[in-house]
Image (tube, rainbow, N blue to C red):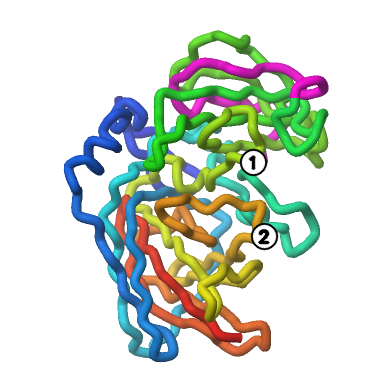
Amino acid sequence: MGRASDVQSHTSIQSGYPHQRFAGAIHARVAANLAVAMVVLCLGGIVAAQEATATAAGNDPGTSTAAPSASALATATALAGIEPQVLSRPIAVTAGQVHWADRTYPYGSTQWDTRPVHLGVEFVNPRYTPVLAAASGIVVFAGADVDTLVGPQLDYYGKVVVIEHDLRSLDDLPISTLYAHLHSITVEVGETVEVGDEIGDVGSTGIAIGAHLHFEVRAGDPLDAGKTRNPELWLENYVNHGMIAGFIHDDSGGPIYGKRVVARSDSSWREVYSYGGERVNRDPVWGENFVVSDLPAGEYEIVILKASGAIGYRRHVDVLPDKITFVDVHMSE
């Protein structure tokens, strides 16, 4: 299969079906004792080490620019991964369609304290945009969630499809994907679908504000809204792109919620916030509480501010293609 042109972001997405490339190989790598990389970073005289175990994703045309600081800072290295991105994008990679997760309301965020903690990601597209299966699998739910609880409450996701895949997480749980707020559904419970099959189209059913696809990755019970994982750690890469992920914690080692993180290079500028509360599941292998995905490969400066507005963390990191650069950040307010 050739590479699909990504006109919007001036990149190309990886060819092939990732679930076919990697299904069954994940645990083989673990069993074979594949070396796990370590990245060691120092902040305020405290050295932190974090094991790493995964890979990452793409870019979008809405990225603004800001020049990084010219100060000489230590450089972290991107990590070789053992949990490849195995899910295709649920929106086709083609001109005029948004196939990257919305940057304003990512997984774990509260959209600047204006919304509930988000347990998925959004693909904001016009009504009727085709929605595609992210991997092959069996449909375990297809319909309106008025009588069956698949979200935080009944009639929350509106018309929704849930697909269970022949994939397992590194902690050996079955992986499923959820597609919510659909306008219409074209599959039935028990039906087998292949990656890229159309399963419905974008709508605004349930509690949606405007047309978009709400997309989740779940590990464990496919109908349990409490089993989500960050989809950006699972979606396949764009060519020549990588990701920064990390864990921001306090003196006791507990996560710091809602911390602003800026990642910037000579050509890109992105801002995210650390996960917004205890309801957000961190990957049990990564242990992350923030993710900056879809970054063009290159050198980036990470800046994290303290509550006072002072810079609490600043470091240069290298983002390499198909790699996650993981940083462990200790901050004392």
The residue located at (31%, 54%) in the rendering is 321
The residue located at (75%, 35%) in the rendering is 211
User: Which residue is labeled 1 in the image?
Assistant: 226
4 or 244: which is nearer to us? 244
Residue range in magenta is 124-148
Where does residue 115 sit, x and y in percent of width and height? Answer: 78, 54
Residue 230 seen in this snapshot: yes
- Name which residue type carries label 2: Gly
Q: Is residue 13 left or right of residue 81?
A: right
Residue 94 seen in this snapshot: no
User: Which residue is labeled 2 in the image?
Assistant: 277
10 Å neighbourhood of mark 1: few (<14), some, or many (≥20)?
some
Where does residue 9 sit, x and y in percent of width and height? Answer: 47, 49
10 Å neighbourhood of mark 2: few (<14), some, or many (≥20)?
some
Q: Work out how far the residue at label 2 is from the one at label 1, CA to CA, in angstroms.
A: 13 Å
Where does residue 278 sit, x and y in percent of width and height? Answer: 65, 57
Count of labels shown? Answer: 2
Q: Secondary structure at mark 2?
A: loop
Rendered position, 41 above or below 6: below
